[in-house]
Amino acid sequence: MLTQGIQLFFQELTAFLTLRTLFDVLWATQLGMIVGMLPGLTATMGVALMTTLTFHLPATNAVLILMCMYIGAIYGGGRTAILLNIPGTPANAATAVDGHPLARAGRAGEAIGIGTTGSFIGSVIGMLLLATFTPIIGRFALRFQSFEFFWLAIFGVVISGNLTAPKDPLKGWIAGFLGLFVAMIGMEAIHAHVRFSFGYRPLSGGIDLIPAMVGAFGFSEIISMMKHIRVEVIQTKIDRVIPKFKTIWGYKRTITRSGIVGTFVGAIPGVGEDIAAWVNYDLAMRSSKKPEEFGKGSLEGLIASETGNNAAVAGAMIPVLSLAIPGSAPAAVLLAAMFIHGVRPGPLIMVENPAFVSSVVAMVFLGTIAMFVLGLSAVKQIVKVLLVPRSKLMPIVFTLCVIGAFAINSRTFDIGVMVVFGLLGYAMREMDYPVAPMVLGIILGEILDTNLRRALVISRGDLTPFFTRPISFTLFLIVLLSLVSRTSWFIAARKAVTGAIVRAVRGAVQRVRS
Amino acid sequence: MGDKLDQDNGMPRADFVTGLVLLGFSTAVLYFSIAMPRLEHRGINPLSAPGVVPGLLGAIIGVCSLALIIRAVVRGGYRLRLSKRSFSAFVTSPVVRRIVATVAICLAYAWGLVGRVNYTLATFLFVAVFVLFFELVFDQEKRRSPRSTVWKAVLEAVLVAGIVSAVFQYLFLVSLP
């Protein structure tokens, strides 16, 4: 199995080694880096807009360009975080905490070099785990029936709500269930009955994901960007960029841990690179020998967050390929793009199209190499892009949002969808509702709808199979745990129990020593 | 996230209002789901009726919004404290004016111009107006000379409108709106 996988990988990789493809890899990664660097242009928005620009290309080329754009954008945002203390994408917020103090101390070049290397290794670790776990999860998911898919959809929005709104998960869940409802609009898949269109014909086709996402992540971002005047000036000097091997080797444990944890956080439905970076930052701080340096320019903190967020990119593709459930918001766009191009990921992909999984692994590999090379070269020149004022940049972005929403189906209705979701996304942001669970809900809505009804018909209305089938029961327990784990009494009980355990262990250790 | 419109921790009040809106919304969803045809004449299983899942979602959103309302009430969010003064302070704050300007210009383009006026012309007007409005009206301290600002804005608008139209029409073969 392993040798077959490696063989397929090299087969796909060599297929990509044409001049045209390599050119695509380079420009897409570079463009992704620029998109990621510019505050207000996020990875999700970049990938969503690029989907509209590439949908005339053959499937593999289009997905390759999107994948490179995604990798480049998540990496590029770190540059702005280091130089300007503004995360280029939300995924780089943790990078700014230590990256910017380093830049102010005159170590911008070193910080960029370390960040680039971390991103590179994180991406490679993520790629290896993607190649290993996708077939395993895919094969496991072949045993899923309607009952399991129902729980999987619920699990997706609940866990995404939990993690994207850590302070107030209730708002995350509301966003998720609203997203599930959005997917109910239009013609349903079992009886072709049109729901909630109220006689308005364009609505009977439902709400398309791409215009909704371009609005929720693009237009809403434009509004937040334009609301303040901010003068952006770069005064930092950039010295040596290529890092010393010894420095990197010194952080080998942090890098490995961040890569693995980042990938798995990325693989959780709807939980993306931003959470992966913060989780790793937190883990690095707790396990560090110098926790006092964190926040003041710790290389360890910087490397943890940058390794983690790029590992999450590959991680987010694991559920996309094996379950057709996105691990992050940009991965949701990639999933939609695959459907547009006629590739159907999901449990059957290992049976129907096993080469595609290796193909995506090869794409991640190429994007990672391109990111590493481009990331360490032309640093000073590329940074000049940041000098473009937002009053000049944002109208261009909105023009692309409008034409991008229109281009896929050539319907002006989709421009309206983009605008409505932009305003909704902005309102949600102001009220502290996360947008990612809503987007995940729009994707999972159909899975929930068809599978719940199918399951009820199979069981003749009996609810017990939802709780007695082994995988169903496990998923139900996870959902229940994610819900109650956020209640105050559960947190208090958990603290009491861990406190008791820690005291008991300490006592035992002292007794053994004495 | 630190730059919220409401600085005095108005979140419970906002939650109270959103909770009420969501409750109204979920009730409507529940009502329309129950009223949805069950398609009995086609002999389908009532458990697979189209209204089942939307109804369930309506109920779940309803429960969540009730929880939101109760929590907001406990935190004192039901005291809305609306007054003329707070309203006029809200309307005249520069942040709100910038938001309104952004949304208004973007909506005028997306809903007013695109599809009615030639796409390239619409895009030219939008980019030019957007840049000029923000650079001449709002960000005055940065302004160097108005004439060069105008020229640069017009040049940018011509380039953006031309390039985007040409790329989509001839390269991506999209018939422009």
Image: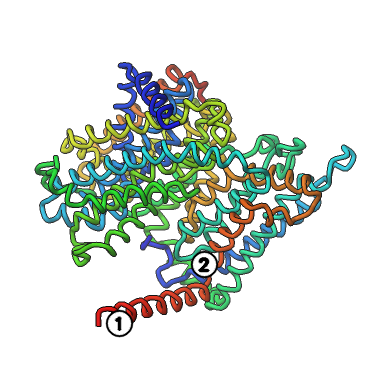
- From this view, report whether residue A118 is shown above or below residue A135: below
- Percent from the top left, x then y, of residue A396? 37, 35
- Circle 2 chain: A
- Percent from the top left, x then y, of residue A170? 54, 63
- Percent from the top left, x then y, of residue A293? 18, 63
Residue at 88%, 43% (x, y): give it.
B40
Residue position for label 1? A511
Horizontally, is A507 left or right of A148 in the view?
A: left
Quadrant of the rendered image containing residue A376: top left
How crowded pointer 1 is (Cα within 10 Å; few <14, some 14-19, many 20+) is rated as: few
- From this view, report whether residue A164 is shown above or below residue B37: below
Give the colour scheme shown.
rainbow
- From this view, report whether residue A497 is shown above or below residue A13: below
Local secondary structure at mark 2: loop
Query: Which of the pair A299/A386 is nearer the observer?
Result: A299
Residue at 30%, 16% (x, y): give it.
A19
Query: Which of the pair A404/A9 is nearer the observer?
Result: A9
Nearer the viewer's eye, disc 1 or disc 2? Answer: 1
Return the mark for residue A284.
none
Horizontally, is B31 left or right of A101 in the view?
A: right
Return the mark for residue A485.
2
- Residue type pointed to by label 2: Ser
Q: Residue furthest right?
A: B41
Q: Are marks 1 and 2 on the same chain?
A: yes
Local secondary structure at mark 1: helix
The reply to whether residue A37 is in sight is: no
| CA distance for labels 1 and 2 | 34 Å
Horizontally, is A410 left or right of A395 in the view?
A: right
First reached walking from the N terminus: tag 1 or tag 2: 2
